[in-house]
Image (spheres, rainbow, N blue to C red):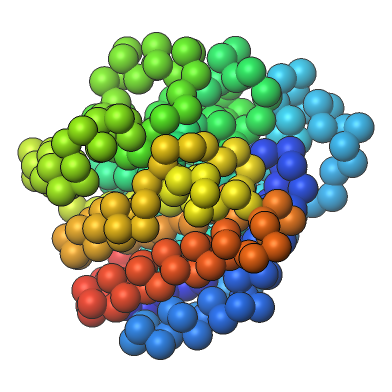
Amino acid sequence: MHIDLIKAPLFYGCDREGVEHGPQTLMDHGLIDILQSAGNQVRDRGFIPVPVIEPENKYLAHSHMKYLDGIIDTNTHLANQVVSSLTEGRLPLVVGGDHSLGLGSLAGVTKALGNEVAVIWIDAHADINTPETSPSGNIHGMPLGASMGEGHESLTNFYYNGQKVNPRNCFIIGARSVDDGEVEIIDRLGINVWYMEEIREKGMGIIILELMELLRRRNIKDIHISYDIDSLDSALVPGTGTPVVNGMEYDESEKLIRAITSTGMVRSVDIVEYNPKRDHEDQITLKSVLHMVQVFSKALAEVGTEQKAI
């Protein structure tokens, strides 16, 4: 696979410092070598610039969305990079940073490929809050909802006006910490969600079969994977912004990633929310993230075909 590595050192969306160091820490521990050793060709597109905003100014742009201007600015640069990468027939791999970077990834992907892209959101959280439903005002809990047209116009009309993601083509897997306001949006929009309780009850194999059938029915041709490391159990990833118990084990996550990637339809990937400052001394989170990067890398390499330029 021809991969463009894009690093987004952003913490404004979670308002918890440390996650911005995730991309560099992964680079220091062989990120590019892991991607290349599986047989992928990797081009490093560098770091997305992030403006400096002082904490006392976090609510300057909006009374219940923190660091809004900084997030918009950073995601605009990110969306431009994603569009450029896809236009050249490459797969943008965005490494964060917090999940507010999903705004830029999704805007860029849909600008390039159209808004019938399937979005597979692998996360302990739904990330479809609005300023009204969010208990924290942290924008990393809003990018998926905003991309489906839910929330403040500064986010719903980010990069280009209108809905980026068709809710029918949105698939959330691994959720187990969902706010009441998000549940209402899920029900109203008919979003496909597999909670961890259902995954454990049925087994990941059945969940994958259900996902694949929905992708077939929707006649999906392009997939964006947004992978939050907190989809893994908190014992495996203590070094993340909001670790949640009873998450996926390695084998469940591996099986899911391999199945989705084997369709040959994955066009872009996010890997987000690794916070090295919150990791344990044994660096178990780092080990978990590198392990999952290796899973992605091998799966993408096995697909083995370069995307067509658009």
Image position of 156 with respect to 299: above or below: above
Image position of 52 with respect to 88: above or below: above
Q: Position of residue 24 (x, y in %)?
A: 68, 70
Residue 109 versus residue 93: which sits nearer the camera?
93
Q: How many marks?
A: 0
Residue 179 versus residue 270: which sits nearer the camera?
179
Q: Quadrant of the C terminus?
A: bottom left
Q: Is residue 157 left or right of residue 213?
A: right
- Please name the residue shown 41% across and 42% down the image: 247
Q: Which picture quadrant has residue 162?
A: top left
Residue 15 versus residue 8: which sits nearer the camera?
15
Q: Quadrant of the N terminus?
A: bottom left
Image position of 134 with respect to 78: above or below: above
- Please name the residue shown 36% across and 39% down the image: 174
Q: Position of residue 191 (x, y in %)?
A: 29, 26
- Please name the residue shown 25% across and 62% down the image: 258
Q: Position of residue 222 (x, y in %)?
A: 25, 53
Report if residue 252 is visible in the image. Answer: yes
- Please name the residue shown 47% across and 72% down the image: 4
Q: Is residue 296 left or right of residue 95?
A: left
Report if residue 111 is visible in the image. Answer: no
Q: Position of residue 51 (x, y in %)?
A: 79, 51
Q: Is residue 43 left or right of residue 134?
A: left
